[in-house]
Image (cartoon, rainbow, N blue to C red):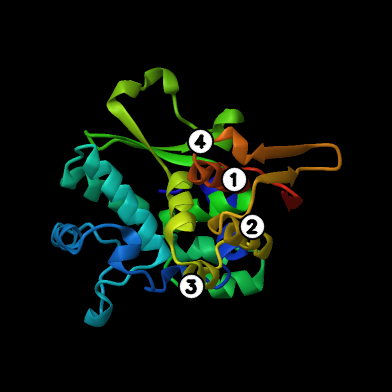
Amino acid sequence: MFGASFLKNNVENIFKVFGICDKIFNPVLTVNDLCISYRTINSWETSGLMLRERSNSRNWHKFSFVDFVWLNIVYELRQLGFPLIKIKKLKDYLNEKIDEQTLFEVKRREARISLNSVTLDRLVLLLAEILHNKNHIALLCNKEGGVYIYNEQLIKEERSGIDFGQLEFNNFVSISFTDIIIKYLSKTRIEIIQETGIINPMFFEILIKLRENTIQGLILQLSEEKSVQIDSGLFGKYNDFMSACLRLMLTIKFEIATVI
């Protein structure tokens, strides 16, 4: 089950980031957007790896932002040789629903009403935590089915609940949610990203310029005294520069962003 304190502190982030949430579940992506073959998707569906059953057969090969994240997790684990039965166990873990009582305790009435209108789970909660709190989160998985949530903020505060001294890291692989979101922002059609609304207008404007290769540098103003700058000349390829810019904007809280 979810930790009570984590739920209390973070469930409203879903509303802050995704609003009424329906857009992140809209099936608007194609298999081409996923860069995964029809044959592979069909195999995973037969194995019970899809997050949600599809009631409309016309939308069978259409996918949402949440589907994109999950299917990229599956893809990475399969590339690393993880057995399907263990990935299905991970699916059940991330698909754990947020109970009605927890949603009822959300403070803001408009948030409570909208959150109660959709089915929310652990995966959506983690995505909201990343996008709202600018927190790096990854999955630590092993082939025996063990799963840990690597929450960088909680680890820094020594509140993760993970005893790293007991983990044999050579048996684990790390799947970064941040990397998957960067892939989504880098590859997905720009109009779909705008419709999904997972980033704010300032972030979206910079994303357009990055995708058009018209930015040579980026300055993030963290406070009146502190800023971070990144320049394209530090990278051999523009795509590496773009990924670095997106990573900064996803993991650092900033007040103003200036392009060069």
* SS state under label 3: helix
Name the N-terminal-most of marks 1 and 3: 3
Name the residue rendered at 29%, 52% in the picture.
Answer: 91
- Residue beneath label 1, please? 245
Position of 171 with respect to 10 (left or right) is left
* Percent position of residue 197, x then y: 56, 67
Name the residue rendered at 48%, 72% in the picture.
Answer: 23
Q: What crowding class fits label 2: few (fewer than 14 Cα within 10 Å), some (14-19), or many (20 or more)?
A: many
Q: Is residue 153 visible?
A: yes
Label 4 and label 2: CA atoms lie apart by 21 Å
The foreground one among 199 and 18 is 199
Name the N-terminal-most of marks 4 and 2: 2
Q: Of circles 3 and 4, which is in front?
A: 4
- Residue beneath label 4, please? 236
Name the N-terminal-most of marks 3 and 4: 3
* SS state under label 4: loop
Name the N-terminal-most of marks 3 and 2: 3
- Residue beneath label 2, please? 206
Q: Are marks 1 and 2 in contact (CB under 8 Å)?
A: yes
Q: Amino acid at mark 1?
A: Cys
- Residue beneath label 3, please? 23
